[in-house]
Image: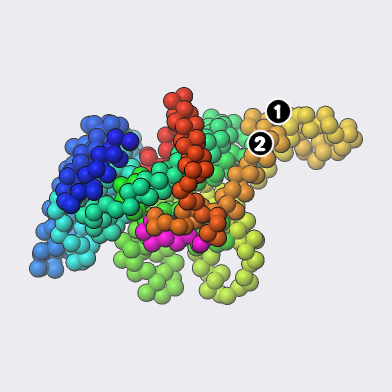
Amino acid sequence: MPLTISIAIWLGRKESKKLFIYFLCLVSLVFYGWWNPSFVPLLFSSILFNYFLGNYLQGCQYPARRRILLGVGVSANLLVLVCFKYLDFLGEIIGGAFSIDVNLPALELPLGVSFFTFLQIAYIVDAAKGDADKDQFAPYFLFVTFFPHLIAGPLVHHRSLISQFSQRMTNVYENVAVGFTIFVIGLFKKLVLADTVVYWSDSVFNGAASGIPPSIIDSWVGAISFTLLIYFDFSSYSDMAIGLSKMLGIRLPENFNSPYKATSIIEFWRRWHITLSSFLRDYLYVPLGGNRKGPIRRYLNLVIVMLLAGLWHGASWQFVLWGGLHGAYLLVNHLWRGQRLLVLPSPVGLILTFLAVVFAWVPFRAETWQASILVFKGMAGFNGLILPVHYGEMMPQDLVRFLGNLGVEFATLSVYGGFNQLFLLGLLLMFVWFAPNTQQLMGRYDVVLDKRAATIPMWMCWKPGIISGCVVAFVAAYLWMLGLQGKAGEFIYFQF
């Protein structure tokens, strides 16, 4: 990274940005190929196909031909996803529908295939509508492969990113200071905050996948742990992508805006994975009719979009259920607002929204239907009301016998770690509910496109200085040592 950033800055300050673009194209390919070089030809072929198709669609004067070619282009891109991501799932569906054995091969999933495919579907759709410019091949190639967002987004619009590649780099020292700080914040979320709860989450869900029913305490600890894990994991990736881009003088769109502070599901989806929500709205919800064809069609479109959003995350009924739950949540939320029913106080709305999100994350994380059911039953207390065995030793025996008559057992729990664990989970919840997010902390600087985060007092915002520089350097060195010790785990979203 230091070598890449240094050379890119040197090239970016020149009058012509051609070498800057060519260099970043090269290092982005190296970055992608480092994981598995055998998939580089797939990425390259996808870019070639969509670039030349997009250019032809922009110049095509025949509407019917444009529609046909656009349909072919979208189908070809989706076929790539089907072959690598959904083939085995389709075999399962066909086999279940016709009661036959269909053994379709489960191919290795190329890194970031959903993201670079969706980026290019949006490009050819815009090209067919006349909303795309005829760009040279190198800037378009870099738009797709730009390594900060290549693996897991944000899903940036081609026009907003390509136009920045040709702008001469300025404010280099500020960009590096601000960008590196954001990068370190993201890395801290991943290596420290996310990795704090990953064991608790995995223990519950892996146990449920093996048929071990979790207790009510273990179930809630596991579900809340995963809720925090996926937030810190994905927001850390987004911060690191934005920070890396800022060091190169490039702004990416904001992707997270404290989603667990949302007081409704509608607001949650305006804060969570913002660029995916925008993509689904512009390229799926609106083409389906949006809210232009009456309330019933509007609600049906919402549910369809959320089901497809779930399927986009993975080839499993678990993800479809997750999308269906959020579709149902949105439906209820819109009906509630449409009927102008009681307006809930913000704290009540926040807690209800958070609990609904926690509930929906269960099938997203669980590996099977059976595992989801076991965790759901545990959260509802149907797997038995089990308290830690040492609690019984601290209670009067009369109370222990009374609780035993009510069905409460005292036994060893597999995940629950006592007060210290609950205290740490509480601290992390306070962090996501009340602490300013990264974009708010960087409120002095122009860091992202279309910033949505609310402003905070300027005295709370970060600014370069001796003290802040020492803090960032110390944290970066600590995280570097954690990485050398093998503490760096995979990002959850890399598989999507």
Tell me residue 233's x, y (percent).
47, 42
Task: State the residue in front, 36 or 359.
Answer: 36
* Label 1, residues with CA under 10 Å away: few <14, some 14-19, many ≥20: few
* Label 2, residues with CA under 10 Å away: few <14, some 14-19, many ≥20: some
Q: Which residue type does callout 1 highlight?
A: Thr
Task: Tell me what residue is drawn at x 35 percent, y 47 percent.
Answer: 173
Magenta-drawn segment: 448-456
Task: State the residue in front, 399 or 272.
Answer: 272
Task: State the residue in front, 401 or 101.
Answer: 401
Query: What residue would you read off at disc 1?
Result: 412
Q: Would you identify the image quadrant in which residue 234 lies?
A: top left
Magenta region includes residue 56: no
Q: Looking at the rendering, in which quadrant would you find the N terminus?
A: top left
Query: What residue would you read off at disc 2?
Result: 421
Q: Earlier in the sequence, mark 2 or mark 1?
A: 1
Task: State the residue in front, 30 or 231.
Answer: 30
Tell me residue 171's x, y (percent).
33, 52
- Asked if the residue under mark 1 is in contact with the one under mark 2, i.e. CB atoms within 8 Å, the reply is no
> Regarding mark 1 in the picture, which secondary structure is present there?
loop
> Going by the image, does 54 lie left or right of 365?
left
